[in-house]
Image (cartoon, rainbow, N blue to C red):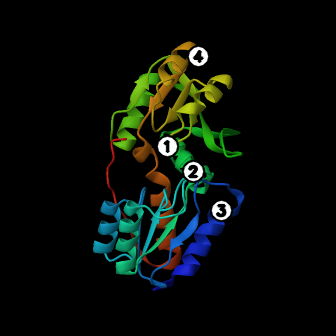
Amino acid sequence: MADRDRIVEFCDGLLEIERFDDYGPNGLQVPGRREVSAVVTGVTPTRAFLEAAVESGADLAITHHGLFFGEGSPALTEQQAARLRTLLAAGVSLAAYHLPLDAHRELGNNALLCASLGLEPLEQRFGEVKGIAIGVVGNDAEGVEAGELFARVESLLGREPLVFESGPPRVHTVGIVTGAAASLIGEAAALGLDAFLTGEPAEHAMGDAHENGLHFIAAGHYATETLGVRRLGELVAERFGVAHSFVDVPNPI
């Protein structure tokens, strides 16, 4: 058994949550049992995810997107209330880490995606969101064939990405910002990058890619944001001696 608050304190400090002005609260969002023997991680606390967490016997769920997210009314919606009841009825705690988990230089979504694709991260920061650059510029000094890069993305994430193939035949630099970051393609173009990788596409992305001469790769919002929270769960398990499992609720978006 481990203390829930010690686990959350560890995650809060590791991810430096105080540095971020986010779209919702980072850290513990729903308190449940204080003693934790099993942790589950996932991308979004949907009913399907939460029910699977309860079924698995988890005491603490850690997600990337929180239960409370966005800048709308603080009043609970029916959907949020149903999700909250699932947690409260089972005594399961929920913690969430959004921008801090995107931005972390070692276990963040962008950093892990960069490393997993065989790219070296540059010191240059990229992809500013709410005043902090959360993205990564990955580099291959010798260059990787564009088709090979696209194939690596598909193999890693288990889905065929949407690609606007408009860049050079060999790719040296790739800007990476997971999730819904298509609006940052202009920043990638301004930096002279060969490719830009994100999760979701946007209508303007095709024209932007063609006119600026870079490859645009949309590999899925969900798929690109599975890496960081899974690794965070593994670290929690290693440090606190608790069980960990990643609950996959595949989403084509």
Quick one: label 4 or label 3, which is nearer the N terminus? 3
Quick one: label 4 or label 1, which is nearer the N terminus? 1
Instruction: Give yes or no for contact between labels 2 and 1 (Cβ–Cβ under 8 Å).
Output: yes
Q: Residue at x 37, y 73 (%)?
A: 85
Q: Picture quarter containing residue 246?
A: bottom left
**C-alpha separation, residue under disc 3 versus residue under disc 2:** 11 Å
Quick one: label 2 or label 1, which is nearer the N terminus? 2
Q: Residue at x 53, y 32 (%)?
A: 182
Front-most of 15 and 200? 200
Q: Residue 16: horizontal and vertical position, in percent? A: 67, 62
Q: Amino acid at mark 2?
A: Asp
**C-alpha separation, residue under disc 4 versus residue under disc 1:** 22 Å
Quick one: label 4 or label 2, which is nearer the N terminus? 2
Which residue, given by chain and number where applicable, does mark 1 sit on?
179
Q: Residues within 10 Å of mark 4 (few under 14, many from 20)?
A: some
Q: Picture quarter containing residue 44?
A: bottom left
Q: Residue at x 51, y 15 (%)?
A: 210
Query: Which mark is on residue 17?
Result: 3
Which residue, given by chain and number where applicable, does mark 2 sit on?
102
Query: Which mark is on residue 212?
Result: 4
**C-alpha separation, residue under disc 3 versus residue under disc 1:** 19 Å
Q: Residues within 10 Å of mark 2 (few under 14, many from 20)?
A: many
Taking the image as shown, residue 77 lies to the left or right of residue 104, namely left
Q: Amino acid at mark 4?
A: Asn
Q: Amino acid at mark 1?
A: Gly
Instruction: Give yes or no for contact between labels 4 and 2 (Cβ–Cβ under 8 Å).
Output: no
Give the answer, above or below, for where 123 lies relative to 171: below
**C-alpha separation, residue under disc 2 versus residue under disc 1:** 9 Å
Q: Residue 167: horizontal and vertical position, in percent? A: 52, 18
Asked which secondary structure carries label 4, the reply is helix
